[in-house]
């Protein structure tokens, strides 16, 4: 008899949460942010003015809301942009425009992230020298135009939300490859030559997870999906044309099979030290692409979309409609990386030399800003030796999954730590969010390297590339995990 009542009690306790669970509502939209005129392109050291449009540049929006009857319990909105990053100028413009359209909805529930394509419009008016003769849409104009298109689309996604089902899955695709080569003397170089006697290793791990999360309406029509790959979209980074990089063929392949109306929100995982470029086996990769009669972009799209297809049927069979939804927004105060006097003196000399060259070669504007920012930070550091950097993060729990965001180009090892120590069944790490900026400006987050990478040096792990160093990186991990795991207690 005891055994019977014990079994019954367990059954009742398991059933009660189902009675109390809220219902999930999902809304989604895709907005075309392809500029109507030429623009300066972001991501490289010099100015490039776009010559044509090779693919659409989009923002893909997924609104999540939990309701109990008519009452909203919690909510958030993800917006994934085909951009290098979410500059503060664009971030604030979108939130301000959104607040005028839907004042009852907290703008801090918006999670803006970027795929990190290097062939997208510039949002920072001070980043590059744009010649007066250039017949193009200037950054301030593009920011205003993009905000006025994006904010209404976010509102539409929220207002059009319908009762929904969700499920998730994981497979693997080799897209990201560590781009830092280590040599005999212990130094590291981004995209360093591996075909030389002093080459010793590829510096760090890679994360080949393809995390997916799907949403269907109550009639089982697929509405939208998150696809989380820990790799920046910079296969064609040097072009002078607007291009969404490998996410364009990936979306095309996914929509062809799963539905043209499906919203595909690409989210970039921790990927500061990786890219789609391979440092070795280049000839073998090129040969296979040739045999398949595929471009490198299509090959990457094939890998990612196949990983999604491998999970879709299994996810479809395990749909749920009443998951827990929790969203938390925090601003963490992370220690800034302290600049040494030799680093300051070297940067000051570089800045002074570059400043003299600007009149003849204004295209060196970004290099000057890159060095001069270190000078400014060092001088501020003298009055504030314990300076911190304000880091906005979001943590979102949806059922057994969790999302953790950060504004950095976060080295992969930090993302792997979060995934390994998370209490969630599946963890989505999302970098380049919410006004992150890019290294070389006073307000930017920049790269966040590991201790090993910082010792090796090289672009992405030198003082000019970073605002926060390895000690701050570990604090970001610990604080993110504390919030993430607290949602599952």
Image: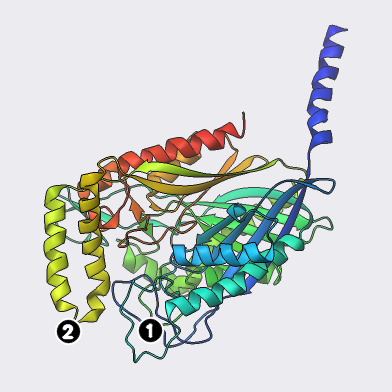
Q: Quadrant of the C terminus?
A: top right
Q: Residues within 10 Å of mark 1 (few under 14, many from 20)?
A: many
> In front: mark 2 or mark 1?
2
Dot 2 corresponds to which residue? 360
N-term-proximal mark, 2 vs 1: 1
Q: Is residue 37 left or right of residue 193?
A: right
Q: Quadrant of residue 235?
A: bottom left
Q: Quadrant of residue 3?
A: top right
Q: Is residue 103 left or right of residue 440?
A: right
Q: Residue at x 23, y 59 (%)?
A: 194
The x and y percentages for residue 481 are 49, 36
**SS for callout 1:** loop
**SS for callout 2:** loop
The x and y percentages for residue 115 are 48, 63
* Circle on res. 488: none
* Circle on res. 49: 1
Above or below, 366 against 434 in this view is below
């Amino acid at each position: 008899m005891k055994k019977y009542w014990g079994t019954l009690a367990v059954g009742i306790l398991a059933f009660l949460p189902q009675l109390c669970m809220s219902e999930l509502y999902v809304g989604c939209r895709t907005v075309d942010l392809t500029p109507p005129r030429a623009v300066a392109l972001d991501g490289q050291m010099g100015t490039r003015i776009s010559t044509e449009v090779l693919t659409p540049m989009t923002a893909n929006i997924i609104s999540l809301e939990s309701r109990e009857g008519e009452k909203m319990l919690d909510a958030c909105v993800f917006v994934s942009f085909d951009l290098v990053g979410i500059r503060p100028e664009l971030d604030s413009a979108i939130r301000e425009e959104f607040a005028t359209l839907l004042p009852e909805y907290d703008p801090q529930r918006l999670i803006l992230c970027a795929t990190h394509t290097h062939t997208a419009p510039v949002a920072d008016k001070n980043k590059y020298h744009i010649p007066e003769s250039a017949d193009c849409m200037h950054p301030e104009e593009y920011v205003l135009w993009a905000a006025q298109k994006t904010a209404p689309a976010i509102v539409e996604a929220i207002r059009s939300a319908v009762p929904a089902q969700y499920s998730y899955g994981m497979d693997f695709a080799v897209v990201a490859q560590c781009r830092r080569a280590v040599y005999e003397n212990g130094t590291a170089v981004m995209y360093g030559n591996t075909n030389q006697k002093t080459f010793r290793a590829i510096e760090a791990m890679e994360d080949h997870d393809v995390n997916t999360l799907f949403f269907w309406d109550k009639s089982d029509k697929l509405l939208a999906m998150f696809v989380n790959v820990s790799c920046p979209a910079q296969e064609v980074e040097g072009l002078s044309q607007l291009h969404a990089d490998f996410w364009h063929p990936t979306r095309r392949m996914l929509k062809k099979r799963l539905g043209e109306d499906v919203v595909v929100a690409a989210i970039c995982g921790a990927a500061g030290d990786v890219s789609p470029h391979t440092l070795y086996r280049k000839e073998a990769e090129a040969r296979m692409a040739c045999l398949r009669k595929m471009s490198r972009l299509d090959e990457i799209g094939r890998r990612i979309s196949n990983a999604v297809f491998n999970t879709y049927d299994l996810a479809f069979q395990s749909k749920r409609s009443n998951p827990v939804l929790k969203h938390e927004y925090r601003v963490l105060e992370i220690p800034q990386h302290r600049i040494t006097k030799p680093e300051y003196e070297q940067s000051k000399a570089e800045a002074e030399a570059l400043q003299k060259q600007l009149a003849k070669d204004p295209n060196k504007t970004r290099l000057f800003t890159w060095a001069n920012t270190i000078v400014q930070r060092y001088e501020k550091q003298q009055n504030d030796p314990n300076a911190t950097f304000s880091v906005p993060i979001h943590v979102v729990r949806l059922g057994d999954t969790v999302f953790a965001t950060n504004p950095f180009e976060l080295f992969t090892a930090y993302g792997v730590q979060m995934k390994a120590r998370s209490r969630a069944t599946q963890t989505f790490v999302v970098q380049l969010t919410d006004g992150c900026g890019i290294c070389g400006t006073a307000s930017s987050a920049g790269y966040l390297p590991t201790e090993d990478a910082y010792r090796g040096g090289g672009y992405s792990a030198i003082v000019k590339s970073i605002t926060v160093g390895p000690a701050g990186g570990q604090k970001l991990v610990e604080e993110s995990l504390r919030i993430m795991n607290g949602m599952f207690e």
